[in-house]
Image (spheres, rainbow, N blue to C red):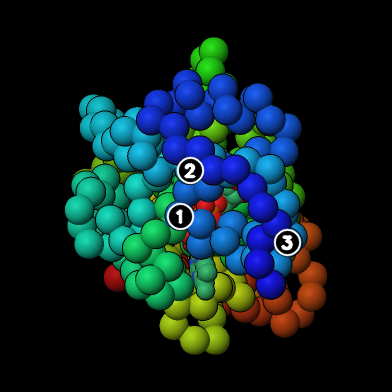
Amino acid sequence: MKPSSFDYAVPRTLDEAVALLNGDPAAKLIAGGQTLGPMLNLRLVQPTLLIDITRIPELTRIEETGDGIVFGACVTHAAFEDGRVPDPAGGALRRVARGIAYRAVRTRGTIGGSLAHADPAADWLSCLAALGAEVIAYDGHGRRTMPVATLMTGVFETAIREGEILEGVRVPRPSKQARFGYYKICRKTGEFAEAIGAVLFDPERGVHRAVAGATEAPPIVIEDAAAFLQEDGDLDAVKARLGEHGLTDPYSLQLHAVALQRAAMEAWL
Ligand SMILES: Cc1cc2nc3c(=O)[nH]c(=O)nc-3n(C[C@H](O)[C@H](O)[C@H](O)COP(=O)(O)OP(=O)(O)OC[C@H]3O[C@@H](n4cnc5c(N)ncnc54)[C@H](O)[C@@H]3O)c2cc1C
């Protein structure tokens, strides 16, 4: 199938892109097109205007601040994988990027597109929620930030408002002692996850965070992970905690508990 016809615009500034977005209620942003492309072909979406945001310099910028790094929304998965951008989390971003899909998808797919699409199984959602990252949204008048942990409001739904563009992601720099663990369960390398466990232990900053992702809902974020993720690997304690967050199906509970426990073990190693 082919997409229905649409106009195509390539704005060079963020304000131009926001103006185009607000000027047509049936307009859609396109970044890497790795998700939107197939949706257009299947006519699941039929925009009248596609706004290609990949040539906007602000959206590919990297801005180092004292306590973290802001990545423009159009930084690609491949840029993280190749180490072309700095990694405030000691290699965690590079590793997670490497496990997304396969190289052709990573070359074009972007961190902002992945977050905005809000597939529950997306790797960046769980990884960045565990790292305590925030997204920056721009509406032409001002910016607001929100934690990645609360960005996703439902399956394929986010707190990004109509007329807003996800401009970037701010990833805080963990302390030198921080340990990160990530474990993705999928049938074949590069496939979407069936379960994701992501853990950040950073005692210096008082962070013991665990995230269970790919739950067919927004990621489950637990802030006191040290209380139930033990080095001796008591899976029942993990299951009990996930059960409190609404995971009840025995198969799903087992997968997510194992993913979390393995992520925690990796962080302890
Ligand atoms: C075969 C295949 C396997 C995959 N496997 C994985 C996987 O294992 N793990 C994983 O995490 N992902 C996977 N993906 C998804 C991939 O990571 C996509 O790149 C990503 O989800 C979408 O990014 P994109 O830049 O291509 O966005 P696009 O497809 O261009 O856009 C996606 C959506 O986000 C909106 N959007 C894009 N950018 C912005 C922005 N800056 N502000 C607001 N809205 C925006 C668009 O309007 C659209 O609705 C896979 C994709 C494919 C095709």
Which residue is labeled 2 in the image?
52
Q: Is tag 2's residue or tag 1's residue first in the polypeptide sequence?
A: 1
> What residue is rendered at 66% in x and 61% in y?
3
Q: Return the x and y of residue 93 as percentages of the image width and height.
A: 33, 56
For marks 2 and 3 on the same chain, the one whose residue lies earlier in the sequence: 3
Considering the image in quadrants, where does the N terminus appear?
bottom right
Q: Which residue is mark 3?
A: 43
Could you tell which of marks 3 and 1 lies nearer the N-terminus?
A: 1
Closest to the camera, between mark 2 and mark 1, is 2
Residue at the limit of the structure toward the bottom, as seen here: 187
User: Is there any visible trace of residue 235 in the rendered image?
Assistant: no
Residue 123 in sight in this render: yes
Looking at the rendered image, the disc whose residue lies closer to the viewer, 3 or 1, is 3
**Which residue lies at the image location 47% right of the left edge and 48% below the top edge?**
31
Name the element at disc 2. Answer: strand
Q: Is mark 3 within 8 Å of ligand 1?
A: no
Task: Label 3, secondary structure: give it.
Answer: loop
Label 3: how many residues lie within 10 Å, few (<14), some (14-19) or many (20+)? some
User: Residue drawn 70% across and 67% down?
Assistant: 42
In this rendering, would 19 be left or right of 217?
Answer: left
Residue tagged by mark 1?
Answer: 32
Compared to 64, does 93 lie above or below? below
Between 15 and 214, the one lying in front of the other is 15
Q: Is mark 1 within 8 Å of ligand 1?
A: yes
Q: Amino acid at mark 3?
A: Arg
Looking at the picture, tell me which residue is in the foreground, 171 or 39: 39
Q: Position of residue 252 (x, y in %)?
A: 70, 76
Q: CA distance from mark 2 to mark 3?
A: 18 Å
186 lies above or below 217 = below
Residue 46 higher or lower than 73, as above or below:
below
Residues under numbered marks 2 and 3 in contact, where contact means CB atoms less than 8 Å apart: no
Disc 1 marks a residue whose amino acid type is Gly
